[in-house]
Amino acid sequence: MKFSNIKFLTLTLLVVLTSFQSYAQINKAEIIATGLTCSMCSNAINKQLKSITEVDSVGTDLNTNTFTVYFKKNTVLQPKVLKNAVEKAGFFVGSMVVTMKTDPSKIQNNSVKTDAGTFIFIDAKNPITSTEASYQVLDKGFVTQKEYKKLAKTYAKKDTYNAENENDYHLKSVK
């Protein structure tokens, strides 16, 4: 009888823990890389992204230098891991758009804390729904330097944006 209770408790704990991670889990990321000059450059980025254990597959568009990264189910990955992979290949992220499903009831002060970091929604115009949505990451290293300078002026009043905490990700809705 004790063994079945232990199995039940273990199963219950597993269900509870996985449900906590699902309130803001990234399913897909679209990365536009800068500095590429040939197909060998995109191949280097492709290899780095595929080497991440949480990555299921990577699609590449050579015309736009866009890498679409799909993740394995029930995995948690911080966007900075993707950025670091692109930089390890010798290039930079010009834009990153993440697609995720968010539970609006878990959001406090336009942010949600997860194992993948704190996601801060700075686009108050679009309400956050429980459906899957796409958000552009607006932090340093996730946009071009020129764009970051503009954004730093625009969001100068946001303390979290100016702090440049590497585990805080400022997101803007993408239509």
Image (spheres, rainbow, N blue to C red):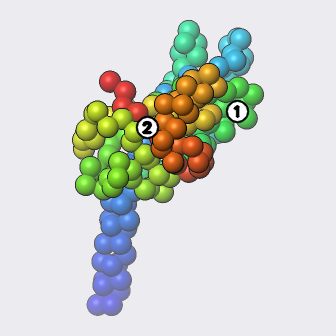
Residue 56 at x, y = what percent? 50, 38
User: For the point 43% across and 56% down, which residue is it?
Assistant: 113
Residue 72 appearing in the image: no
Q: Along the line of sight, which residue is nearer the eye, 163 or 41?
A: 163
**In front of the other: label 2 or label 1?**
2
User: For the point 58% across and 16% down, which residue is it?
Assistant: 65
Give the mark nearer the N terminus: 2 vs 1.
Answer: 1
Q: Which residue is disc 1 drawn over?
A: 87
Quadrant hosting residue 40: top right
108 versus 97 height, above or below? below
Residue 41 at x, y = what percent? 71, 19
- Quarter of the image for the C terminus: give it: top left
Residue 15 appearing in the image: yes
**Amino acid type shown at disc 1:** Glu
| Secondary structure type for disc 2 | strand
Q: Which residue is disc 2 drawn over?
A: 171
